[in-house]
Amino acid sequence: KKDSFADPHTKKLVDNPGYLKDPTKIAQHVLEKSGDTHANSVVVGRSAVLGIPEFNDEGTVAENAMTFSKISHPNAETVAACVTLAGVVSKIMLAKEEPDKHDPSAWISQCVEHGKKMLEDEKSVGRFGKCVDESTTLEDLDLSNNKDGMSVLGAALWALRNTRDPSSIPTALHTLMMEGGDAICNVAAAGSLLGCAFGVRSLPKEWIRSVIHKPFLSEEVSELKNACNFV
């Protein structure tokens, strides 16, 4: 039901009779009326999966991330964060096929530079830089008070940089959860990067067993694998 949407912005989109015909145009119209310039945490948190289809084509990954963002939150900060997060996933995927390209620091730097190009003003560039810098700590991110998509991106990159082996995954995600703020999106984005980097077999077995809607999700994953020609 339309009235069940918790997010007023999403409800405004789906309530608009022209949304299905031209979602980007309607999303831009709704955004301009709201005046919101901050990156949306939910959209950024969901964007990691866009780094999987055609992961070996940087331009296509960025285009998919931009399109995904623009049909709901077309502001520059959301686009930049989505492009960056999806880009990192694509680099992880590429390194699995080409081990000689396994250089996380270089991946992140390349994706950050790509994402930065999406930004339109110095304030946004400064906020972006603070969230994605290699020296950024959880204290710097201040996740309990910053609940936008930039913080989600920063939390995910922090987790990837500071998790050295699979056994540290639970600790990293628990640490992010205890930071508060938009903990669900922070942990979802971080978990996406860590799961991609270390593989599903590296996750605690009890996590896999207790996944809600597991049959549905397994089917979705199978469809994605088939679409991407993964074995």
Image (cartoon, rainbow, N blue to C red):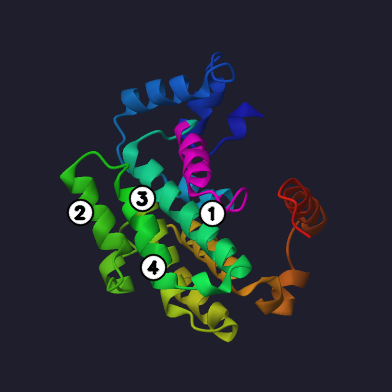
* Residue 136 seen in the figure: yes
Q: Which mark is residue 126?
A: 2
Q: For label 3, count other residues whose C-alpha is less than 10 Å away and answer few (under 14), some (14-19) or many (20+).
A: some
Above or below: residue 43 compared with residue 27: below
Labels 3, 2: front one: 3
- Cα separation, mark 1 vs mark 4, equals 18 Å
- Out of 168 and 2, give the one closest to the viewer: 168
Residue, disc 4: 106
Q: Which mark is residue 114?
A: 3
Q: For label 1, count other residues whose C-alpha is less than 10 Å away and answer few (under 14), some (14-19) or many (20+).
A: many
Residue 201 belongs to the span the image colors magenta: no
Residue, x 60% and y 66% (percent of image)? 196
SS at badge 4: helix
Q: Which residue type does callout 4 highlight?
A: Ala
SS at badge 2: helix
Q: Position of residue 11 (x, y in %)?
A: 52, 29
Q: Position of residue 214 (x, y in %)?
A: 78, 59
Q: For label 2, count other residues whose C-alpha is less than 10 Å away and answer few (under 14), some (14-19) or many (20+).
A: few
- Cα separation, mark 1 vs mark 3, equals 15 Å
Above or below: residue 101 compared with residue 122: below
In the picture as drawn, the residue positioned furthest to the top comes out as 17
- Cα separation, mark 3 vs mark 2, equals 15 Å
Residue, x 45% and y 33% (percent of image)? 70
Q: Which residue type does callout 1 highlight?
A: Ala
Query: What range of the chain is rendered magenta?
Result: 51-70
Q: Quadrant of residue 158?
A: bottom left
Residue 64 belongs to the span the image colors magenta: yes
- Cα separation, mark 2 vs mark 4, equals 20 Å
Residue, x 28% and y 66% (percent of image)? 133
Position of the N terminus by quadrant: top right
